Image (cartoon, helix red, strand yellow):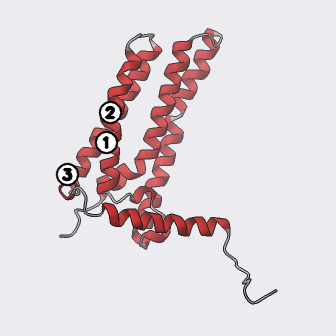
């Protein structure tokens, strides 16, 4: 083996985590000064409440679709128009700690992030039972021929996955103290 080829113990995952940490820190520097008035606890909590209301609305839309309301799918668009900006702003003002790489956080932040992720996963698993049972029972009763049921079930699944994916950031946004001046 020549002197120029040095064996390395770094795996593909290690290299990816390093890249992810560098990219996260770069984005953190880019967005650190954006929306300073929204970085307070009351404003972050307002965003969390707005997201919760949006998810409730999305689930209600899926129920309307289950009942065959023809115009109900059009209500998904306003829900998305509220969801995407609210989610983006919450991610910016909370420092994206819900999905931050471990190397970018201190011990306490890692513990909080992991706890929030655990809650998000548990909530996703339990909430996913709703569309699962709806689809299983509905398919059994209709012989799998009800397209409204399939569409509604898909919207329910999508809503639950959005809740589970957003919940860690929502929890951290809710509990984080106000930033120091």
Q: Residue at x 39, y 22 (%)?
A: 61
Instruction: Give 129 or 19, whichever is nearer the viewer.
Output: 19
Q: Residue at x 46, y 50 (%)?
A: 119
Q: Quadrant of the N terminus?
A: bottom right
Q: Quadrant of residue 52?
A: top left
Which badge, 1 or 3, is on the more N-terminal residue?
Answer: 3
The numbered disc on residue 42 is 3
Instruction: Give 120 or 51, whichever is nearer the viewer.
Output: 51
Residue beneath disc 2: 81
How would you rate the neighbour count of disc 1 (Cα within 10 Å): few for under 14, some for 14-19, many for 20 or more? few
The CA span between labels 1 and 3 is 18 Å
Picture coordinates of residue 76 (x, y %)?
38, 25
Picture coordinates of residue 135 (x, y %)?
58, 22
Which badge, 3 or 2, is on the more N-terminal residue?
Answer: 3
Instruction: Give 134 or 96, whichever is nearer the viewer.
Output: 96
Tell me if residue 128 comes above or below residue 68 in the rendering: below
Query: How many marks on residues?
Result: 3
The CA span between labels 2 and 1 is 7 Å
The CA span between labels 3 and 2 is 22 Å
Secondary structure beneath label 3: helix
Q: Quadrant of residue 181?
A: bottom left
Secondary structure beneath label 2: helix
The numbered disc on residue 85 is 1
Q: Residue at x 42, y 69 (%)?
A: 105
Relative horizontal placement of residue 134, taking residue 44 as reference (left or right) = right
Q: Quadrant of residue 25?
A: bottom left
Picture coordinates of residue 127 (x, y %)?
49, 35
Q: Residue at x 52, y 20 (%)?
A: 151
């Amino acid at each position: 083996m020549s002197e120029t080829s040095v064996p390395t113990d770094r795996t593909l995952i290690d290299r990816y985590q390093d890249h992810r940490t560098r990219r996260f820190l770069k984005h953190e520097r880019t967005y650190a000064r954006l929306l300073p008035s929204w970085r307070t606890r009351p404003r972050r909590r307002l965003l969390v409440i707005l997201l919760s209301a949006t998810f409730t609305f999305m689930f209600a839309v899926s129920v309307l679709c289950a009942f065959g309301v023809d115009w109900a799918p059009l209500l998904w668009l306003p829900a998305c128009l509220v969801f995407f900006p609210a989610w983006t702003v919450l991610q910016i003002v909370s420092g994206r700690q819900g999905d931050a790489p471990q190397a970018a956080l201190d011990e306490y932040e890692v513990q909080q992030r992991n706890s929030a992720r655990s809650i998000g996963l548990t909530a996703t698993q339990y909430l996913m039972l709703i569309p699962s049972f709806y689809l299983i029972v509905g398919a059994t009763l209709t012989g799998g021929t009800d397209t409204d049921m399939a569409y509604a079930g898909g919207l329910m699944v999508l809503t639950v996955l959005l809740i589970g994916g957003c919940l860690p950031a929502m929890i951290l946004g809710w509990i984080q103290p106000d930033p120091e001046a």
